[in-house]
Image (spheres, helix red, strand yellow):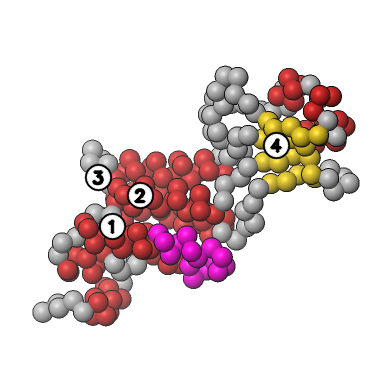
Amino acid sequence: MERLVAKARRFNVVIEFVQQVGDFVALDEPLFYLYGNVDAIDESRLRSLVAFGTERTMEQDPMSAFRILVDIALKALSAAINDPTTAVLAIDQLHRLLRMVGKRSLRVEKIRDASGQVRVILRTPNWEDFVHISFREIRQCGAGSIQIARRLRAAIENLIQSLPEHRHAALRLELILLDRAVASKHPFPEDLALARIPDSQGLGGSAASTEKQLAVSGVNRG
């Protein structure tokens, strides 16, 4: 990146990446937008300063770790495997990563030279991107599992409690969608009430806490 900034400063241009890290780049697809003294710069030389690979890596692509964990959860929830406990373990790690990401500044990255002039602009994932990848597909595949529904709720509610206010809107939407999905999957009120209780273990949290939640929900246990 330092070499790109130096090149942009030398020729007095701004380099904006079209793709973000992790995107597939097809043959002859544009890689940059150039602004300023564009005729003075050698585009092939610029391309040589960009690293390409055959697959995404966690070291350079922040979304890659999320994608791998979500794929583990989805495979575990498939009819062929049916292993919701493994999916819960994947949600544990997604929860941990979201707590870290949610406390960071997420914005379009503008890299400046020593004089303060913007020289390189990079597209980066925003908070909604991280929330969507963490919850949407798992909810679609796992809402019918009481264990998954409870673990998702526990993660989302904890994130709302622990992250800054400006992170809450996307999380509250996920709670609404989770409620809708769970309601559509559980026709029996007893199952529905149980599925709506947050549980960081998925299913296996305190029985006393579960009984209290069921009582609050108005479910007849007699």
Dot in front, 4 or 2: 4
Which residue corresponds to mark 4? 16
Rendering coords of residue 70 (x, y %):
41, 45
Q: What amino acid is labelled 4 in the image?
A: Glu
**Which one is in front in this view, the residue at disc 1 or the one at disc 4?**
4
Q: Secondary structure at mark 3?
A: loop
Number of residues whose C-alpha sits closer than 10 Å to that of mark 2, classed few (under 14), some (14–19) or many (20 or more): many
Looking at the image, residue 208 lies above or below residue 18: below
Vertical placement of residue 54 versus 77, above or below: above
User: Magenta residues?
Assistant: 160-174
Cα separation between marks 2 and 1: 11 Å
Which element is circle 2 on?
A: helix
Instruction: Please tell me whether residue 143 belongs to the stretch shown in magenta.
Output: no
On screen, residue 201 versus residue 191, left or right, reads: right
- Name the one closer to the observer, 138 or 119: 119
3D distance between C-alphas at marks 2 and 3: 13 Å
Residue 181's tag is 1
Q: At x 46% / y 42%, what residue is drawn?
A: 67
Circle nearer the viewer, 3 or 4: 4
Alpha-carbon span between mark 3 and mark 1: 19 Å
92 or 14: nearer the viewer: 14
